[in-house]
Amino acid sequence: MSARPGPGAPALGAKDAWVFDLDNTLYPADTAVMSQVDIRMTQFVMRLLDADRETARAVQKRYWREYGTTLNGLMSNHDVNLGEFLDFVHDVDHSVITPNPELAGHVAALEGQRVVFTNGSRKHAEKVIDRLGLNGLFDDLYDIEAAQYLPKPHRASFERFTRHFAITPHSAVMFEDSPANLETAADMGFTTVLIRASAEDPDGHTAGPGAHPPHVHYAADCLTGFLGQLRAASSRA
């Protein structure tokens, strides 16, 4: 667990809400989940636009950069069936996720509201949580449909999320692998925790080793380890 250089990060002890991103946060980024989703997205765009793989992938990545998610770009520029898109891209092999009873124990020990906030679908989130062994540990899941298909890092999406759960950002912590999403969270007053990947991501979806942007209060290479240290510190207090 590392603190931001400078005047110091907000204390993590007593918080009213703990907000977790899903993919590449609850499980390690080197787990072959999002790589499958990425391939499925390219296939969907190929079919939607009747394009070859290279063209479809270029469109997919441009939409992700310009609109926050590929889906948001498709919605803005094409007639797309939202449910069909989500079902197709999340039709992946979730068995690659390893159950994590240690993480389950640490999440269960957090006092306060516990919520998953994801740009993915609820069905996908439920499968991930089930594979990890985290069933029953979150008060709710907030997916892209609940967000009315406006993804993180858009501030309006965060504001809709906090209103829905009556979360006061200054009393909440957000765990994320995306520096862009955490920048919005930090601007709103969340205490931010960056979960870094073990290797550089050429597309920039996740933060690589050693990353610690100025808007990040804490950074860690492993969510389980970070929460374990937090739990140990709380027990000594």
Image (cartoon, rainbow, N blue to C red):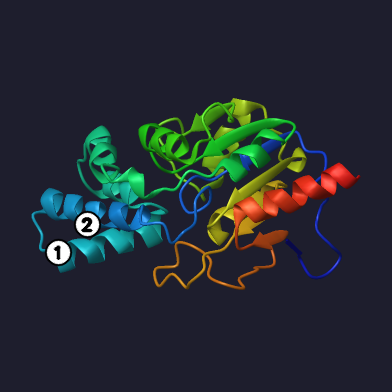
Residue drawn where x is 60% and y is 63% of the image: 221
Neighbor class of circle 2 (other Cα within 10 Å; few <14, some 14-19, many 20+) is: many
**Of 103 and 55, which appears nearest the observer?**
103
Marks 2 and 1 in Cβ contact (< 8 Å):
yes
User: Which residue is drawn at the image coordinates 55% and 33% (left, top)?
Assistant: 160
Would residue 229 be seen by someone viewing this image from the given angle? yes
Task: Quadrant for the C terminus, please.
Answer: top right
Tell me which residue sits at (57%, 63%) in the image: 196
Tell me the SS state at disc 1.
Answer: helix
- Residue 65 falls in image quadrant: bottom left
Residue 44 vertical placement versus 140 (above, below): below
State which quarter of the image contains the N terminus. Answer: bottom right
Query: Which is more N-terminal, label 1 or label 2?
Result: 2
Q: Mark 1 points at which residue?
A: 53
Q: How far apart are marks 2 and 1 (CA)?
A: 7 Å
**Pick the front one: 25 or 147:** 25
Q: Where is residue 74 in the image (x, y as percent from the top left)?
A: 27, 48
Residue 187 can be seen in this image: no
Q: Quadrant of residue 144?
A: top left
Kind of residue indicated by mark 1: Arg
Q: Please determine whether, in this image, residue 66 is positioned above or below residue 98.
A: below
Q: In this view, does 187 lie to the left or right of 24?
A: right
- The furthest residue to the right: 237
Q: Residue 42 carries which label?
A: 2
Three-letter code, disc 2: Thr
